Amino acid sequence: MRGSIGRRVGTAVIILGPLLLIGAFVAERAGISFLAIQILAWPGYMWGVLFLYLVLWLLVGEVIRPFSRRWINRGSAVVEDALVPAGAPDHVTPDQPVDPAPVSRRLFVSRAVGGAAAVAAVSTVGYGTYGVLAGPRVKQLTVPLANLPRAAHGMRIAVVSDIHLGPILGRGFAERVVETINGTQPDLIAVVGDLVDGSVEHLRSAVEPLSRLKARHGAYFVTGNHEYFSGAEEWIEHVQELGMHMLANSRVELPYFDLAGVNDIQGKSIGQGPDFTAALGNRDLARTAVLMAHQPVQIHDAVKFGVDLQLSGHTHGGQVWPGNLVAGLANPTVAGLERYGDTQLYVTRGAGAWGPPVRVGAPSDITVIELASKQA
């Protein structure tokens, strides 16, 4: 009905939704108060992803609409041609009540398709939100390395990326991530960038649980592109205060292999881009090299420097379908393990989410990689 409450609410959502979404995008880079960013982020990002899936489900509805009409023609009582029962008078007197006109076949199908699309969109987004907020799953993977010595066979690296602590995912989420990682009892923890979306000042409490990460050989960190949107120099200092070892275009000689890390490509914006020569030059090529590099596209330099295994994130596996198709255009590998020459690349889907706390078709993960020696 024109002017009904439902119609007014719908109109308000259609008008305010895009404004909130744009506001959420702009606010994170505009330097406004963190509280204002939090207020805008939830409704803005959620409206965006809900609108996406409403459009996609409506497209599905358009595909099945012709079949729905045929079904209604055969069995539905709502038929335009059956407006007057058999034997009814051809006219009505002023004293006779007039029944409301029945819903037309076309309008009935349109309402049914629209309603079903709305329910499907809300269900899809709801399920995807639950998957993120419940925390990442543990994924197990064995990676054979040709040069790995027998003594290192079975060494376990917990790979985590893209936690994205910020205006939506906070301290509680960080605690779930830490609990999950520690529960795997890894020998080494590799945090491969995009830890935060916000400044140290605003997220100091949110990241504090990361100080409780435990592994026999420690936890190591490299920057992602979002660190450079959030004050990278402060975060480089603060992650070390949390007990993580910073690998900024550098490497460390661990028992049995070298662990190296390079800055994210976004670091070029402040003169701190990746430097593979600093991280991998002049090393003993007989030793296995594992590289932490946030973006999968850095694999090409890794191959040149004889890296055995690169650990990356950044893609989120696409995060929300069909985002994986878009991510595939910009990244050599969207998720999983692939080989490039003599170098293997593993890309985790990440533990958190950027923007809307929703994942569809790309579940979050913390991957425990078990290194396997071919000499064992």
Image: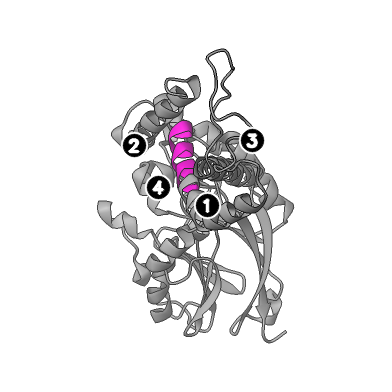
Q: Which numbered disc, 4 or 1, marks the residue that appears first in the sequence?
A: 1
Q: Residue furthest top?
A: 95
Tell me which numbered mark, 3 or 2, is placed earlier along the sequence.
2
Left or right relative to 357: residue 371: right
Q: Earlier in the sequence, mark 3 or mark 4?
A: 3
Residue stretch rendered in magenta on the structure:
41-53
Other-residue count near label 4 (Cα within 10 Å), few / some / many at <14 / 14–19 / ≥20: many
Q: Which mark is residue 182?
A: none
Q: Earlier in the sequence, mark 2 or mark 4?
A: 2
Q: Which mark is residue 22?
A: 2
In front of the other: label 4 or label 1? 1
Numbered tag placed on residue 227 in the rendering: 4
Amino acid marked by disc 2: Ile
x and y, in percent, of residue 72 in the image: 61, 49
The residue labelled by disc 3 is 85
Find disc 1 in the rendering and name its residue: 61
Displayed quadrant of residue 34: top left
Residues at circles 3 and 2 in contact by the CB criterion of under 8 Å: no
